Image: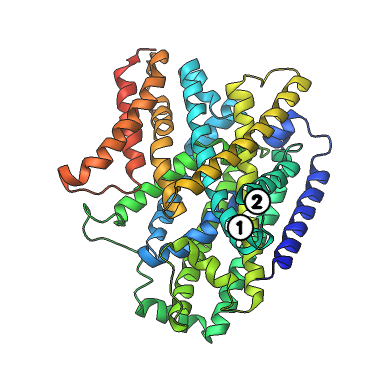
Amino acid sequence: MNPIWIAVILLCYFGLLLFISHLTSKGADNEGFFIGNRKSPWYIVAIGMVGASISGVTFISVPGWVISSQFAYMQMIFGYLAGYQVIIWLLLPMYYKLRLTSIYGYLEQRFGYWSYKSGASFFLLSRTIGSAARLFLVSAVLQIAFFDKLHVPFSLNVLIIMGLIYLYTFKGGIKTIIWTDSILAMMFISALILTIVLVMKDLHLGWPQLITQIRETGLGKMFFWEDFGGDKKHFIKYFLGGMFITITMTGLDQDLMQKNLSCKTLKDAQKNMTWFSLSLVPINLLFLTMGALLIIFARSRNIEIPAASDSMFPMIATGNFLTPLVGIIFIIGLVGAAFSSSDSALTALTTSVTIDILNKGNAPEAVTRKVRNRVHVGLSLVFLLVILVFRAINDRSIIDTIFTIAGYTYGPLLGLYAFGMFTRYKVNDHLVPYVVVIAPVLTYLIQHFSKQLISYVFSFELLLINGLLTFLFLWLIRRRP
């Protein structure tokens, strides 16, 4: 693919995002940066949340996942829907009732200082690793398609991307991001649909023929009920994993909840979450359909499917297998998905560090702004370092890596919030940091030895085990209110 086209796409994106940032960040104060002055239209937030939750990883990894898992990912999507009901009817009312800016303020009110700091710290760890992993994959694709041809090293590639994201987010924060993310989401969804249409046209397939081929090739199997103990793709494992991943990675995550808290009212936030969650079903079904379609295309053209499943879509889209228009659309979609998830993560992390870690939420406006700007720069550099580490050590599907990491890092948050909401006990607050470290370590040991000891292979339900262990240890250090 001609690198000039990629350069034009990046420049157009950057110009558009800077223009939106200029319009939306006028008069932005700290409250505007953190929660959009609680004036965000719910329908714009809903569209933007699609962009924040469906990242560049989804754009690349989910189609590649069809190679090994067929349509099993839809089992997780159905679990997501159950998890969103918990967020809509339990978590959002609590956050709005307490008028939180950072959702981890709940832990301080419920348990105390050390619980609050522990929860915020695990969010910082989880979101930094997860968001850096997502951006790593996108950066790797752009490196091959664009930067290598200009002899630009990978580290400079990532620095350029992080610099672009920083420039349009540092002033307006959430007040800007709800608008940029909604536009980026519409771009990558359009790119997804156009890619499917163009590949189908190249294969001379209509929708009935495509569905028949997916079924006949065995790529479309969606529900897995056999071998509960030995199959990671079993429906119950994926459904429960999806449900609790949603509760933690959305409902207990400052990134996505920060957008919800920017809505005018609780009712608006609930409408946003309802429509956003329902939209994920057809969108992810399209991603999986595209994955099956690309496999069918590769087989029909005798193209060797790469061992690394994440490479399939970029290889076919940017190679010489299809019209160059497909490559252009792919880059448009990829960059849109990458920017829409990374910008909100950077803003949420800045919010959490400024308010939760440095305790500047109630400081004078000028002081908070100064600290916030420094934190924003510092976190951009942290993203850069973590991405470089990922490049050095990662050899798995990125989406699988992200969900596996989430099982360890979000489990303590699940246990803390569940104990706080479903019991009336206090805890010995100074012991909570030990609890949130011990529980993930034990979870790892259980996962590591489960196959040998009980012939059971854990999947994404590992998050639930981690949360239960955290809950159990909190019960052991409880005290009466």
* Picture coordinates of residue 102, whole percent (x, y): 59, 29
Farthest residue toward the front?
Answer: 151
Query: In this view, which residue lies farthest toward the bottom?
Result: 204
Kind of residue sitting beneath label 1 = Gln
Q: Are marks 2 and 1 in contact (CB under 8 Å)?
A: yes
Asked which quadrant contains residue 449, the reply is top left
Residue 43 as seen in the image, left or right of residue 437: right
Q: Quick one: 329 or 20, which is closer to the camera?
A: 329
165 or 5, which lies in front?
Answer: 5
Q: Tell me what residue is drawn at x 74 percent, y 66 percent.
A: 4
Which residue is depicted at the point 41% across and 52% down? Answer: 400
Q: Specify the label residue 143 is tagged with.
A: 1
Secondary structure found at label 1: helix
Task: Locate the C terminus by quadrant.
Answer: top left
Q: Residue at x 65, y 62 (%)?
A: 146
Asked whether the viewer can see residue 381, the reply is: yes
Residue 121: where, in percent of width, then height?
A: 50, 27
* SS class, disc 2: helix
Q: Is residue 355 above or below residue 398?
A: above
Give the numbered dot on residue 157. 2
Q: Which mark sits nearer the N-terminus, 2 or 1?
A: 1
Mark 2 residue crowding within 10 angstroms, few (<14) / some (14–19) / many (20+): some
The quarter of the image holding the N terminus is bottom right
Q: Position of residue 382 (x, y in %)?
A: 59, 36
Please say whether residue 244 is visible from this viewpoint.
no
Q: Position of residue 473 (x, y in %)?
A: 31, 23
Q: CA distance from mark 2 to mark 1?
A: 7 Å
Number of residues whose C-alpha sits closer than 10 Å to that of mark 1, classed few (under 14), some (14–19) or many (20 or more):
many
Identify the amino acid type marked 2: Asn
Residue 96 versus residue 275 in the image, above or below: above
Residue at figure coordinates x 31%, y 37% from the top left? 444
